[in-house]
Amino acid sequence: MRRSLTSAAVLALALAAAFLPAAPGTATADGPAPVRFHTPAHTSAAYAQYRELLARGERSDAAGLLAMIRTPHAVWLGDGGAAETEAEARDTVRAAAREGTVPVFVVYDIPGRDCAGYSGGGVGTTAAYRAWIDAVARGIGASPALVVLEPDGLALLPSDCGQDDAAGTRTAARYAELGYAVDTLDPLAGTRVYLDAGHPGWHTVNSLVARLIRAGAERATGFAVNVSNHHTDAASTWYGRLISSCLGHATAGGDPAACPNQRTDPRTARDWLARHPGVRHFVTDSSRNGRGPWTAPAGRYSDPQDWCNPPGRGVGARPTAATGDPLHDARLWIKTPGESDGLCLRGTAGPLDPERRTADPAAGEWFPAQALELVRLAVPALPTV
C-alpha cells in the first residue's frame, strides 16, 4: 500500500494539497485556495445548439446551456490508439496546468467494455490494454490528475453477461487488467485513481467490496460512485461511506458479508460505521442527478432501462473538492451532460425510444432534447442570464 498515513483527515489534506497547482496566488489568508477542476473543449454540436437557441431568441435556455457546457467535466479516454490517447492526455494536463486547474480523466477502453452494449468496445486483448494504459501514464506524467477507472468494469464483469467460459478466464483477466491499471496509474506523482464501484441501486456493498478487493482497491486512492447514473448525492455518499468502511473491514481480514449495505436499517449501519471507520476515499458523479433517479411507469416496459436517457432529469450540484466529508474527495461531473447513453428501446422492438418517442442518438453523441431538459430542470438551477 503506497500511502500509510494514520489519519483520514491527514490524507484528505494531503490529497487536496496534491491537487493544488504550483502557481502563484493559490493561497489565501484562510489557507489554500479551493481546487478548481478543468473544463475541456466541448463538442461542436453543443455550441451549435447554443447558437441556434440564440438565433431563435431563446436567451434563457441559451444562457443555461452555455453554463452547463462551461462547467468542469471529465475527459473520457477510449477508442483511440495508444499514440493518440497519450497525446490527448498530455495536451489535457498541459492545458489544465496553464489554467491552474486539475483534469479529471475517465479511462474507458478495457476488453469487453459494457458487455458489448451501447458503449461496447475497448481494445481486444490484455496485452493491448496494458500497452494502452502505459500510454495514458506517459501522457499524464507527473501532473495533477484524477482518474476514474473503467465505468462498469467491475459491476459488469464478463461472468455477469454470459461472455465468459466455464473456467472464468475472461473475468480473471478483467481483474488482472484493472489491477495493472491501478498499479501503473496510481503511483504517478500527481495522480489519484478511483475504481468504478457502480451505484447504490445496483450491487450490494457486500458483493461490490469483494470485487473491489480482487481488483486492487487497497492499492488505489479509492473508488467512484454513480458514474453516468442519476442517484442523489445523499444516496451516493451513504453508499460510499458504507463501501469505505467495508473495505477497511475486509482488508483487515473480515468477511464482507458481515458489513451493512445500502438496504440495512440506517441506525444499525451507523452503529457499524462508528465502530468501523472508513479507510478508502471516493468521488461521486452529480452530472445528472439533480432530480434523482427515474422510475418508469409500473408495468409499461419489460426492461425500463432506467439508466438510459431517462426523461425529466436535471444536472446536479456543481463539481467541488469541498464536500465537507474527509472521505468524499470530490463531487464531479464525470458523465458529460447532454451526451446520449445510446438508443434506449426499453424492451420494445423500436426503433424509437418509447418514452421519448424519438430515436435517441448513439452513445456519446450530443442529444439536444435531453440537454435542454438537463438545463431546465437543474438542481440547483443554472444561471440563465
Image (tube, helix red, strand yellow):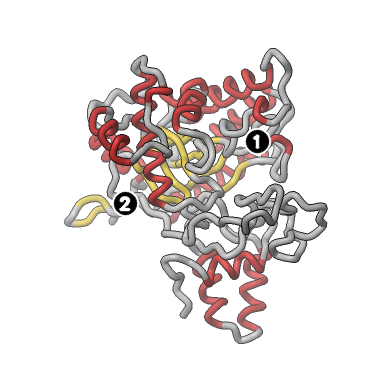
Nearest the camera: 164 or 74?
164
Q: Position of residue 62 (x, y in %)?
A: 56, 76
Q: Which residue is mark 1?
A: 109
Contact flag, marks 1 and 2 (Cβ < 8 Å): no
Q: Position of residue 146 (x, y in %)?
A: 45, 41
Residue 352, by quadrant, is bottom right
Q: Residue at x 67, y 17 (%)?
A: 168
The disc placed on residue 35 is none
Disc 1 crowd, CA 10 A, few/some/many (<14, 14-19, 20+): many
Above or below, 280 against 349 in this view is above
Residue 366, by quadrant, is bottom right
Disc 2 crowd, CA 10 A, few/some/many (<14, 14-19, 20+): some
Q: Can see residue 183?
A: no
Secondary structure found at label 1: loop
As drawn, is 202 to the left or to the right of 102? right
Above or below, 188 against 255 in this view is below
Q: Position of residue 245 (x, y in %)?
A: 34, 30
Q: Which residue is mark 2?
A: 322
Nearest the camera: 280 or 266?
266
Q: Residue at x 63, y 65 (%)?
A: 370
Nearest the camera: 19 or 374?
374
Q: Residue at x 31, y 43 (%)?
A: 16
Amino acid type for the residue under numbered disc 2 = Ala
Q: Residue at x 69, y 47 (%)?
A: 303
Q: Earlier in the sequence, mark 1 or mark 2?
A: 1
Q: Position of residue 93 (x, y in %)?
A: 50, 45
Amino acid type for the residue under numbered disc 1 = Asp
Q: Residue furthest left?
A: 29
Above or below, 186 against 89 in this view is above
The quadrant of the image that shows the N terminus is top left
